Amino acid sequence: MAQPGMPAIPDMMATSTGLTGTERAAILLLTLGEEEAASVMKHMEPKEVQRIGMAMASLSTISKVQVTMVVKEFYTIIQTATALGMDTDEYIRNVLVKALGEDKASGLIDRILMGGHIKGLEAFKWMDPRSIADVIRNEHPQIIAIVLSFLDHDQAAEVLSAFPEPVRVDVVLRIATLDGIQPAALQELNEIMEKQFAGNSSVKASSVGGVKTAANILNFMDSAIETEILDSIKEVDGELAETIEELMFVFDNLTDLDDRGMQTLLRELNTDELVVALKGASEAVKNKVLKNMSKRAADILLDDMEAKGPVRVSDVEAAQKAVVAVARRMAESGEIMLAAGGEEFV
């Protein structure tokens, strides 16, 4: 939710308040008043608006001390911000490259710096997946692939699920082999979308799609559909399917989380889903989870797992997918760092 050139509040604030980053951001917006808060939220992504809104609705027992601390921490951040009055695009580019390296930063830079210009495509982010699928259903698979590449991965996964199996396979193949898009082609596509959503645009070249995008989208899909798509891709290009699988973050990759990241993740997980997910987990994952809980919490979790009895494999897979989805969302917001295929990603 940070403005260009200004540090992100959830990432920078101290945890001394005992609140999550989303909750602290919600408190700050509640203190600003309706008009000011609305002005700030206009600059947020759809998912950020949803998360902040849900946090606002659930905050009912916040103490005056916590509010004071949140505001004080925000004031400290503002005082230390150095980018005000500078070329913010260049500032953001330099910071991301230094923090993530050229390769990792390139796609993120495109998304941040160009998001405000690609209004036709960006409008999809505010639509529900079924409506998006209805809008692009009759488009060429290459167009569908480009549109899905611009969406958040979990949203793209839901849209993709609305298509028949042959279309899903074709689209994922195109996403995985998509190596950027020329400015003229992107401009034309954006103009087509603008006719449905209105507004003007000026579009720069953008790096969209790629094997990692395909892997991230499949991460959020139902296990059966994910397997079906990967099996079909293997028949067309076995090497590509293998590369996609290597880049996917799966439940077993939770062992690669550092202890602090695991503790942060556990605070956000639904206990009932965690119990079911661990019923079919490897000993390594179980041990990773248990070692990052208090002894009392670990004993309760083990008792719940034993009391649960036999669980269907499909239920275990669904619960593990739900855990992975939470981990992915937290990684994208910068709260934890995930790793897959031997490489860290956000």
Image (cartoon, rainbow, N blue to C red):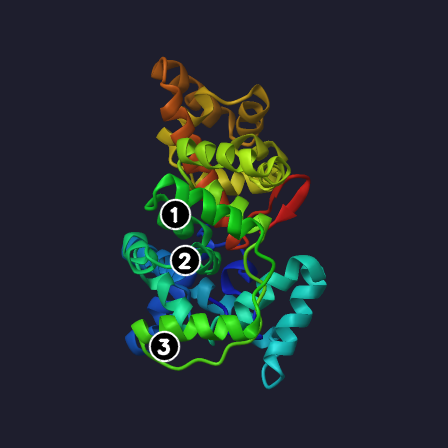
Look at label 3 and name its amino acid: Ser
Question: Which residue is painted at 57% across and 42% down in the image?
Answer: 261
Q: Secondary structure at mark 1?
A: helix
How many dots with numbers?
3
Look at label 2 and name its amino acid: His
Residue 32 seen by the camera = no
Q: Nearer the viewer, residue 335 or 319?
A: 319
Say left or right for 57 vs 306. Answer: left
Mark 2 or mark 3: whose residue is earlier in sequence:
3
Q: Secondary structure at mark 2?
A: loop
Question: Which residue is painted at 39% across and 58% down in the image?
Answer: 47
Q: Secondary structure at mark 3?
A: helix
- Category of crowding for the residue at label 3, using alpha-carbon neighbours closer than 10 angstroms: few (below 14), some (14–19), many (at least 20): few
* Front position among marks 2 and 3: 2
Which residue is the site of mark 1?
160
How far from the left and from the top, in percent, is residue 124? Answer: 36, 63
Q: Quadrant of residue 249?
A: top right
As drawn, 114 above or below 12: below
Which residue is the site of mark 3?
39
Question: Which residue is painted at 43% across and 23% down in the image?
Answer: 301
Look at label 1 and name its amino acid: Leu
C-alpha span from label 2 to label 3: 38 Å
Which residue is the site of mark 2?
140
C-alpha span from label 1 to label 2: 14 Å
- Category of crowding for the residue at label 1, using alpha-carbon neighbours closer than 10 angstroms: few (below 14), some (14–19), many (at least 20): many
C-alpha span from label 3 to label 1: 33 Å
Q: Quadrant of residue 52?
A: bottom left
Question: Which residue is painted at 42% across and 62% down in the image?
Answer: 25
Residue 198 seen by the camera = yes
How far from the left and from the top, in percent, is residue 198? Answer: 32, 78
Mark 3 or mark 1: whose residue is earlier in sequence:
3
